[in-house]
Amino acid sequence: MKKIIVLLSVIPAIGSLSVINRVEPYIFGLPFIIFWSTAWLILTSICLYISSVICDRQEENK
Amino acid sequence: MNSSILIITMTLVLAFYLGIRAKKGREMKLDQWAVGGRNFGSLIMFVLMAGEMFSTFVFLGASGAAYRMGGPTIYIFCALTYIVPFWILPPIWRYAKKHNVLTQSDFFTKKYNSKPLGLLVAVIGVLSMIPYIVLQLKGFQIIVSEASYGLIPPTVAVWIGMLCVTVFVYVSGIHGSAWTAVLKDILILVVIVFLGIYLPIHYFGGIQPMFETLEATKPGFLLLPDKGFSISWYISLCLTIALGQYMWPHCFGASLSSQNESALRKNSAILPLYQIILVFILFIGFTAVLQIPNLQGGDTDLALFKIAKDAFPPWIVGVVGAAGMLAALVPCSMLILTAATILSKNIYKAVKPDTSNEQLAKLTRIFVPIVSLVSLIFTFYGGNTMIALLTMAYSFVLQLFPPLVFSLLKRNPVSKAGASAGMILGVVLVAYFTLAEATMATLLPKAPHFIQDLDIGIVAITINLIVMLAVSAFTRKDQQMIQEEEPVKRIITS
């Protein structure tokens, strides 16, 4: 399980540090560069939330 | 009476009332006052943590940065900032609870079993926090003056604001900050999302048309350039912020008030979503670039207010001002509370070890008005050097990261001598670079751009790390096993 938690942190870390330096295409009205970093906010939130649920379960099982 | 002044005044009164009322029915011992008896659940933790991060910077700085820099401003909502606390805060909290740690300096003292090291951390913390408070107060002056259409004198405003904060921090401690943070968060959320959606629609018919106009008027403004605000600048700055954010003594301290580890993890998970507010701030800044293109220098920080005044009647400007005012005062309250605790518990007591706990609790509260007063003096007489000092302060607190993270390992390879040497060198390097106005570009004129654009904090922390490990390698034998009494701990419970 620990591997999954690590992976759920590493992926958004890489994602949020990467930059796709282009304006086109617009997605949801946003230039791609801004869409990309906004999308990672949401994805990071989801990844960390899943991780914290996993952590909670493990604590309960102990 | 002007409607915007009325709204600002009413908000301040309401915040003051909430701040005082927060004490209700609690006996304010030091741990209740400073970390809420370690009893804050997920929701209040979230508000408190968000309360510290969404300071005047969000109001003035972020919209100003979007105005000046364009696309590179995306660094302000890099999600990495919340992945780091997900990992480091739970083990810190666990250790802090077990050893009754109230401040960051306590934590270092205990972990490295060294009072001088704790004192060093306390001094770095307080030195970094004062410019932070001063910047909030300077922002506060600008916000009130703009939102009241120049009718409230900034000096009077900042005195009144500071008096409110000082009183409710004195009375309610961290509970006061938490309750005013609730009001502040609601106001900011409503104001920023509304402005961010309404302004582009009002002027351009939508968000995408606004961006298209911007791209047509200023081609490349939305992208990271090849040099200057380049990709290596972006990555190094994001790392500086992500690693440094929770090294701020007040952020570190607030995390200790959590009820359990789970609340801290959940909090790290929700905060990135909350950052979406900052995306809306970009919309405001970008609309202002097109609509009010002539702002220069420091005036760019007024972008948000200029555009709000252009588009709205005074009462809405008043609501914007009220949100901005709380964005300054709430972080101030946390900063003052933390600074006062560190000053009494970690600096005064280090000098006079025979101080009793009752004396200490009293003394901490006495430091509250003192810190406020010192900050006010710097606000009035410090000039603009404070802004340079704040940039320096960000890189200062970052230097605490390596010894902290190593101390969380099962076997800490770092000795107290190594930790001190690394931190001191890191801080000195940052101070030198800031005061000499040097950058990697002036230091290494022939280096490739990706090196020249590196943030100075990252350079200093790398050197800090190398020195810390090198010195530790030589001094390790002298050191007794610090963690003998500390059973094997894992970063994540599993």
Image: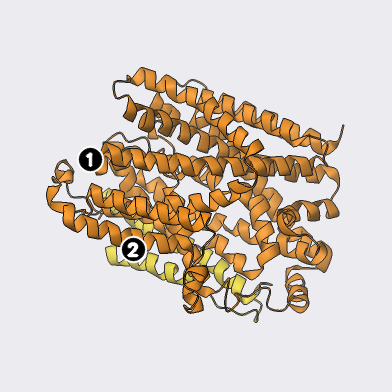
Q: Secondary structure at mark 1?
A: loop
> Is disc 2 placed on a helix, strand or loop?
helix
Residue A14 at x, y = what percent?
43, 71
Which residue matches tag 1?
A: B113
Assign the C terminus of chain B to one quadrant of the image. Answer: bottom left
The subunit letter for the residue under badge 2 reads A
**Near-viewer residue (A16 or B397):** B397
Mark on residue B8?
Answer: none
State left or right for residue B227 relative to residue A1.
right
Residue drawn 64% across the image and 70% down it: B71
Task: For residue B28, say whether it is visible.
Answer: no
Which residue is located at x 65 percent, y 43 percent?
B383
Q: Which chain is yellow?
A: A
Q: Nearer the viewer, mark 2 or mark 1?
A: 1
Label 1: chain letter? B
Where does label 2 land, which residue? A5
Compared with A20, B129 (above or below) is: above
Asked if labels 2 and 1 share a chain, the reply is: no
B38 vs B69, nearest the viewer? B69
Residue B155 against residue B315 in the figure, above or below: above
Q: Is residue B459 above or below residue B445?
A: above
